Image: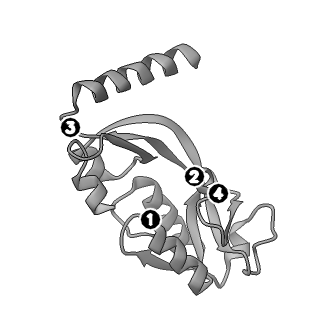
Amino acid sequence: MEAMLDSLGREIDCFVGPCDSLTWKERYNIFPLKPVECCIAVPRKHRLAKKESLRWGDLDGETIMMVKRGESPVINKIRDEIEEKHTKLTIADTPHFYDTSVFNECEQSVCVMKTLDIWKDVHPSLVTIPMEWDYKMPYGIVYSKNPSDSVQAFISIMKNELKNNY
């Protein structure tokens, strides 16, 4: 992930992903597309894998993998709720934003993981389940603070399309 971020504006023009990172907002331009639902991912062999939706009580005794505190206001709010109201749930910090290794670790350790509905098919061994909570994550286009003319034109087109279609 860091290599990709470092190459923005040089080797790659932009990417689409969650965009509430405080660091990213300082270092890059962000064009929000829409909010996406925060969900829970579990390995297919997990006891919760067959559930259609989850409640907080379903997670009692589990370890939940999440991005560390401080980087995402949305994740900070979820952490606050866990620490204040759901103390039977243990939080395991991921070392960085999610990449293949984090999804693989979730599957191998049989933990639950805070994820996004838009990533429901990102890993073949994980099942994404809606959670009965009201957490959404902004999702959008991340691009260089000094974008090329073609990237600026692309963002302009996207802004016009979204304005005209919503």
Mark sitting earlier along the chain (1/4): 1
Q: Is any atom of residue 83 visible in this view?
A: no
Question: Can you tell which of label 2 and label 4 is closer to the viewer?
Answer: 4
Secondary structure state at the residue bearing disc 2: loop
- Residue under label 2, please give it: 135
Count every numbered label the image shows and give the total: 4
Mark sitting earlier along the chain (4/3): 4
Q: In the picture, which quadrant includes the N terminus?
A: bottom left
> Label 2: few (<14), some or many (≥20) within 10 Å?
some
For the point 63% across and 53% down, which residue is it? 117
Above or below for 122 versus 135 = below
**Mark drawn on residue 120:** 4
**Mark drawn on residue 145:** 3
**Viewed as shown, does residue 2 lie left or right of 85?**
left
For the point 28% across and 26% down, which residue is it? 150
* Residue 6 location (% of width, % of height): 22, 54
Secondary structure state at the residue bearing disc 1: loop
Above or below for 155 versus 13 = above
Question: Can you tell which of label 1 and label 2 is closer to the viewer?
Answer: 1
- Residue under label 1, please give it: 98
Mark sitting earlier along the chain (2/4): 4
* Residue 33 location (% of width, % of height): 48, 34
Q: Quadrant of residue 132?
A: bottom right
Observer-nearest residue: 3 or 64? Answer: 3
- How far is disc 3 from disc 2 in space, using C-alphas? 28 Å
Residue type at mark 2: give it. Answer: Tyr
Residue type at mark 4: give it. Answer: Lys
Mark sitting earlier along the chain (3/1): 1
Secondary structure state at the residue bearing disc 3: loop
